[in-house]
Image (spheres, rainbow, N blue to C red):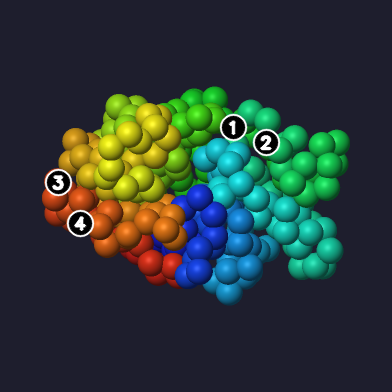
Amino acid sequence: MRLTVVGCSGSGPGPASPASCYLVEHDGFRVLLDLGNGAFGTLQSLADPASVDALYLSHLHADHCLDVAPFVVWHRYSGRSRGRPVPLYAPPGAHRRLASAYYGDSAPLEDVFDFTVLTGAPFELGPFAVRTARTAHPVECHAVRLTAGGRSLVYTGDTGASAAVVELARGADVLLAEAAHPDVPGLPPDLHLTGREAGEHAAEAGVGRLLLTHVPAWIDAAAQQADARAVFAAAELVAPLATYDV
């Protein structure tokens, strides 16, 4: 299994990276985890959009889904799509949210996407066995675990401290965890993880490796990594365009 960071900037595009988007590949199958604002342009430098076999949206905040709009434009007008809908997995309300981002609430998107609502039930996606868990976030958000070839990758999406995310990640080879909040007093609950909390989640889950992501451009990323490493030594910051073997 291979993970490529298309975008990793938290809360919106930053000067060095688009917002959240991750390309996961195994046995020739490609799935995108989120498609945040700015990511579709960078994606085209890494992979032909026609080669994307499925799209998984953890939640419907703009920094995780807004570049579905240019994907629709590309699919309809580039003349290079496969000519069939792309499976899209997302929380309830995705069709309306994405249609509104593209054109208007009633704009049909079924020619571009085959929508499946995430319910918490496990499912198969190409070569991947998929499990999900609701996270601690103001809107419905689903962390995801992809397992193939005896290896597992867990992506938190956005979350505050969450026992459900820890359980989903238990024993995973790689935990791709958001670390958006600085370690300061008075943080709102159920929104984002600090670097230390991401490290604590990784340690409690017993994962092999922690990859920190979704750090906003105005947050000291090195401090987030240091805080995570204080409790989980195998923590590192992802880099835009970097590829990791799971």
Q: Is residue 102 visible?
A: yes
Instruction: Inspect the image, locate mark 2, and give the three-letter code of the amino acid beneath it.
Output: Ala
Question: In this picture, is 106 found above or below 213?
Answer: above
Q: Quadrant of residue 199?
A: top left
- SS for dot 2: helix
* Residue 229 in the image, given as x and y percentages of width and height: 17, 53
Q: Earlier in the sequence, mark 4 or mark 3?
A: 4
**Residue drawn 49% across and 26% down?**
120
Cβ atoms at labels 1 and 2 below 8 Å apart: yes
Q: Which residue is under mark 2?
A: 94
Q: Which residue is under mark 3?
A: 231
Q: Earlier in the sequence, mark 4 or mark 2?
A: 2
Instruction: Inspect the image, locate mark 1, and give the three-letter code of the amino acid beneath it.
Output: Pro
* Residue 178 in the image, given as x and y percentages of width and height: 38, 47
Q: CA distance from mark 3 to mark 1?
A: 32 Å
Residue 226 got which mark?
A: 4
Q: CA distance from mark 4 to mark 2?
A: 36 Å
Q: Which residue is under mark 1?
A: 91
**Residue drawn 47% across and 70% down?**
16
Label 4 packing within 10 angstroms: few (<14), some (14-19), many (20+): some
**Residue drawn 32% across and 59% down?**
220
Q: Is residue 153 visible?
A: no
Q: Quadrant of the N terminus?
A: bottom left
